[in-house]
Image (tube, rainbow, N blue to C red):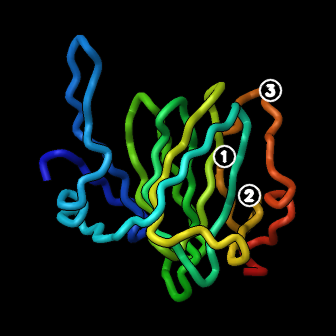
Amino acid sequence: MGQITVETCEIEGLKVITPKVFGDARGYFMETYNKNDFVEAGIDVEFVQDNQSASSKGVLRGLHFQKTHPQDKLVRCINGEVFDVAVDLRKGSKTFGKWHGVLLSAENKKQFFIPKGFAHGFLVISDYAEFAYKCSDFYHPEDEGGLLWNDPDIGVDWPIPEGVTLNLSDRDTKWGGIKEF
């Protein structure tokens, strides 16, 4: 496992991965995913779909999950900077309803592994960001669920840039809270 460093989080199952970066005067090279390294780190997942989004400062996407087709996700920011959040929705978990946030950026090159059973969302804090993620199941639009981004019972401490008005989709303003979940 020489190409990545893995940090565990307070919430079991969440992992922050930092790839080894090889840089020189021409730029850099890194492996963003190597199944052998990930299996050795305890992440033995078959990813079936890659997604990418682009957003401007203040865009908040989430908190989303799929109800009957849950997904493991490996997320990273390839341009700009985002604050990425996972909320534990695993029934019976001692950390049910708790959240963990990670700053992901093109500069730090960190990745965040979010296993099945979590809601996921992110806030763009740079002027522009491109966000990429691998998923272990296909997207099923009819199966999507969500939690209100600012549910006080969850209490995510979003680092909203000063003077920025959040930009949310209509559906992201209408999800219920964790008590309704």
Q: State the image quarter where residue 166 is shown.
A: top right
User: Horizontal and vertical percent for residue 47?
Assistant: 39, 65
Task: State the residue position of label 3.
Answer: 163
Residue 81, percent from left and from top: 54, 33
Q: Could you tell me which residue is drawn at 80 percent across and 48 percent down?
A: 168
From this viewpoint, which residue is outermost toward the left?
2
Marking on residue 22: none
Q: Amino acid at mark 1?
A: Trp
Residue 139: image x %, image y %?
Answer: 60, 68
The numbered mark, 3 or 1, whose residue comes first in the sequence reads 1
Q: Is residue 9 above or below residue 70?
A: above
Q: Is residue 174 left or right of residue 61?
A: right
Check disc 1 and report the residue beneath it.
158
Amino acid residing under circle 2 = Trp
Residue at disc 3, secondary structure: loop
Q: Nearer the viewer, residue 132 or 48?
A: 48
Q: Which residue is mark 2?
A: 149
How far, Cα to Cα, is label 2 from label 1? 9 Å
Find residue 145 and report its image quarter.
bottom right
Residue 144 quadrant? bottom right
